[in-house]
Image (spheres, rainbow, N blue to C red):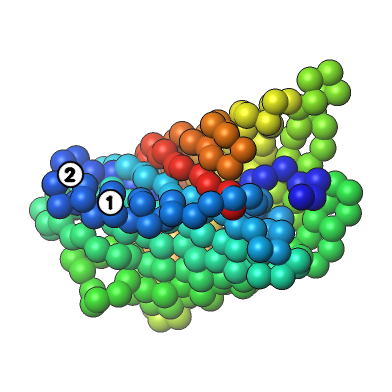
Amino acid sequence: MNNAVPYRPLEPRQTLLAAVSPGSLLLAATVFLMGCYVSGFAHAGAWVQEEGNGLAVTTLKRYQSDRYWDQNSNLKRSSKYSKLEINPFFEYGATPDFTVGFNAFLNQVEVAGEGRSLGLGDVEVFGRHRIWQGEQNIVSAQLLLKIPELGGRHAPPLGGNQYDVEAKLLYGRSGQWSPADESEWYFNLETGVRKRFGAPADELRLDWLYGWRSGNKRWEIELKQENIIALQRGGAGDVRWSDYDLHKLSPSARYWVGRDWAVQGGLSLDIAGRKAGQGIGPFVALWMRF
């Protein structure tokens, strides 16, 4: 194991549902168990997994929104949107310097006046390569492919209707917070461009995360900030999500029950945007290192 503090940036999808059907709960339980049926040790963010080791995280999010920012970033009322999302994430150290993984989203979406849809949304596959690592610093590059929702289009939509390709550069740094109790801090910075094939505008991504880890290695407190900025402007008038900006803030806490298992809870907040919804999304997650 290297000096990097284990860190995994949770995918910024937001979610909620007003009423969950028994069928949805059964489907959620199935995906949850699939995402957690693994055993062992790992890291993430700029850090790569050690060869033969990995990380599995299953996140349950609830999100609700009834406002959106227009093309001038003014808040307006909108139909109530709610989503329940189960997000299994998995990554594995294929070689000492190369990690592969996937990120999937099982959604139940409801929009007032439009109905409800349930199924598999977007799926992402990625590879991350360690370029350089020192005693406290690491630099990596990552390439990601987003595959749109399978099984045809749903109304309301469960994800995007286009393929995306994203190239990203990642930087991580960690160190000692307090020599007295051996607590640690860690920082992760990611920047990249996402090419969205089809009508939606391409995007600039800039995310950072700062975390603190207790001396007994049980507690990790994190603050993450995510930024999506459209690289083209003026498409489709005031239609949301065509060329949008969105800025999010997500505080969370994670507790390692044992060496390889942890539980996490947090809150995702949309704090600013343009042609995008404003909402709030509490989430819980189960982590497993193997």
Read off the residue under disc 2.
Answer: 20
Viewer-proximal residue among 71 and 10: 10
Viewer-proximal residue among 9 and 257: 257
Q: Residue furthest front?
A: 39
Residue 28: image location, x then y, percent: 28, 51
Q: Of the numbered discs in the image, which one, if any, rests on residue 238?
A: none
Above or below, comparing residue 150 to residue 3 in the picture: below
Determine if residue 141 is in view.
no
State the residue at coordinates (19%, 40%): 18
State the residue at coordinates (28%, 49%): 29
Residue 36: image location, x then y, percent: 44, 51
Determine if residue 161 is in view.
yes
Above or below, comparing residue 259 to residue 198 in the picture: above
Amino acid type at mark 1: Ala
Dot 2 lies on which element? loop
Above or below, comparing residue 57 to residue 244 in the picture: above
Number of other residues with Cα within 10 Å of mark 2, as a class: few under 14, some 14 to 19, many 20 or more: few
Specify whether 115 is left or right of 259.
left
Residue 162: image location, x then y, percent: 38, 77
Labels 1 & 2 near each other (Cβ < 8 A): yes
Dot 1 lies on which element? helix
Read off the residue under disc 1.
Answer: 28
Specify whether 69 is left or right of 214.
left
